[in-house]
Amino acid sequence: MRHFKIARALATGVALALAVGSAASAQDASNDASTAEQTIDVMNKLFGKHPGFRANHAKGVVAEGSFTPSPEAAKISKASLFQGPAVPVTVRFSDATGVPTIPDGAANANPHGMALKFKLADDTEMDVVVNALKYFPVATGEEFRDLLKAVSESGPDAPRPTALEKFTASHPAAATAGKTAQTPSSFARQTYNGVNAFVFVDKDGKRQAFRYRFVPVEGEEILPPEEAAKRDPGYLMAEIGPRLAKEPARFRVLAQLAEAGDPTNDATKPWPDDRRTIDLGTLTVAKAVPNSREAEKALLFMPNALTDGIEVSDDPLIDARVQAYAVSFGRRSQ
């Protein structure tokens, strides 16, 4: 709850600061910009400014459902999410980039994302933000900003080696992470991964680092790139509502557990596949909301909006994401 209040306050503060500082010169703003502000600025440069939309994952659709915990989850964490009956969940599926009209089947629409807001029994909320990448291209917020800058400076006429080629030469994951996410036939048929590490705390205070994984019960179904490119530009957004009206989509919510020596502060490094994975429960996505565009305007998903029994790890990207999401929320809320 404490993290949730901080995240909300941060977003509100950013919005107020942006409004108050709107009369400042562009030069002063550039000199004083935080890493998060610089990150959103370069996203706006790459994708254009689209008032009212997110700087990244601009195109999305909102749905509602519930989460039912497993008995095993209650043993590894004291979080209320895992102790009682099913809780309501708001889910937002999305395409990558800040372009609200990007075709769903475009290569640049990967990685597709899923953000979740769990409504807990004590009237608080907990957020989880995952996507289809198996690991992240960079390890810090500063590196992510620099990666975006390198992309923006590496057009077809840029001198070789380009800024992006130089960046990927020194950051190997930046050249390979994107290839781990592919286009699904449906948002309900994609596996979503938590690239950041978090920490479970049980009733005795025992701590266990983990990463989320959401696996579709129906199985993952990936389209070949040439087939995805032929699909209607809005096929994923249009498909999910009728699908859910016929039958809810279900995901197994898993946690991959770290062992001694597994890095928790570097999202570019996936843990070995043989690490133990436990079943936390089942996410059931039951229906699309009637007016998704209006619903998503008020939604802010913060990776550090947690509950007692789940904590952030030492992964610096978690705070970097919180800061950037707050800047994006502040701007689109003006």
Image: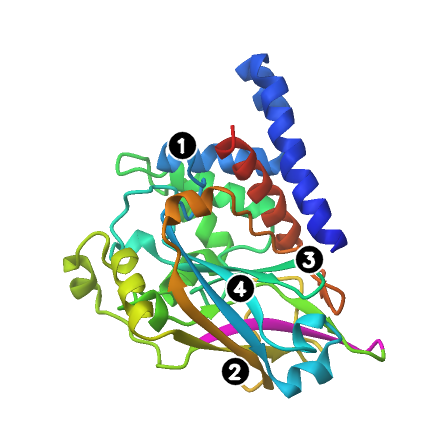
Q: Are marks 2 and 4 in contact (CB under 8 Å)?
A: no
Q: Earlier in the sequence, mark 3 or mark 4?
A: 4
User: Does 59 sit above or below residue 209?
Assistant: above
Q: Kindly state the secondary structure of the residue where label 2 is placed.
A: loop
Q: CA distance from mark 3 to mark 2?
A: 34 Å
Camera-nearest label, 4 or 1: 4
Residue position for label 2: 273
Which residue does the numbered mark 4 point to in the structure image?
Answer: 89
Q: Which residues are magenta?
A: 205-215
Kindly identify which numbered label has been placed on residue 124: 3
Residue found at x 31% / y 52%: 108
* 161 versus 290 height, above or below: above
Pointer 4 and pointer 1: residues touching (CB < 8 Å)?
no
Q: Amino acid at mark 3?
A: Thr
Residue designated by label 1: 45
**Badge 1 density bin: few <14, some 14–19, many ≥20, Cα 10 Å:** some
Q: Nearer the viewer, mark 2 or mark 4?
A: 4
Q: Is residue 136 above or below residue 159?
A: below
For the point 36% across and 37% down, the residue is: 47
Q: Disc 2 versus disc 4: distance between alpha carbons? A: 29 Å
Q: Earlier in the sequence, mark 2 or mark 4?
A: 4
235 or 258: nearer the viewer: 235
- Mark 1 or mark 2: which comes first in sequence? 1
Q: Residue at x 40, y 81 (%)?
A: 217
- Using the numbered discs, state the Cα–Cα distance from disc 3 to disc 4 in whole angstroms: 12 Å
**Foreground residue, 79 or 86?**
86
Can I make out residue 97 in this image?
A: no
Q: Residue 82: where, in percent of width, then height?
A: 66, 76
